[in-house]
Amino acid sequence: MYKYFLLSSSFLLNSCTIYPNHNQYFNTKANISNNIYMPYNELGKAESKINSLIEIIKAQQKYGLIVFGANWCHDSRSFATTLNSSRFKKLLKNNYEIVYIDVGDKDKNINLIRNYGVKGEFGTPTVFVIDSNGNVLNLDTAVYWRNAHSIDDDYKYDYLKSFIE
């Protein structure tokens, strides 16, 4: 039984579905601190950011990525770092626009996640792929990314590429 307790504890500690009480990254000012990419700084209203994204992708006929996450979450930071890597830049530049939305300690902008159709449990990051009309294309996998740090970059690349082919 102790073995199963350790296994379940390890899962909870490695997943951003459960978050720490003391949040060393919450409300940090810089985008890059100690070589850690932290894009989830809410500088404006999240809904306005999403509306601007939709206007841009309509005008440019691109897809949108709305990434709900937090700087305290290693999976959120890992996913954002992957998207910011040179390997992903060409794919994203030509086909996607991205907006990062801060969920705080899972107490901010949750209504927006619900508006996009997530009803039950969600983790960070939760990633929506939307078309130029604002329709969600990946509702069935939007919450899948809560273990993004453990997901292979080839899978992430192929996943994003699959929407543009």
Image: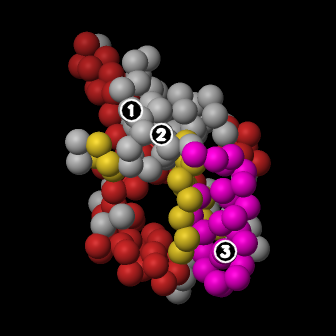
The percent coordinates of residue 14 (x first, y second) are 33, 34
Residues in magenta, as a range: 43-66
Which amino acid is tagged 1?
A: Tyr
Point out which mark residue 12 bears: none
Left or right of 62 in this view: 88: left
Q: Main SS of the magenta segment?
A: helix
Residue that carries the numbered disc 1 in the rendered image: 25
10 Å neighbourhood of mark 3: few (<14), some, or many (≥20)? some
User: CA–CA distance between discs 2 and 1?
Assistant: 8 Å
Which amino acid is tagged 3?
A: Ile
Residues at circles 2 and 1 in contact by the CB criterion of under 8 Å: yes
Residue that carries the numbered disc 3 in the rendered image: 56
Which amino acid is tagged 2?
A: Ala
| Residue 148 makes an appearance in the image | no
| Of labels 2 and 1, the one closer to you | 1
Point out which mark residue 70 bears: 2
User: CA–CA distance between discs 2 and 3?
Assistant: 24 Å
Left or right of 52 in this view: 37: left
Q: In the rendered image of this protein, does residue 150 appear above or below residue 99?
A: above
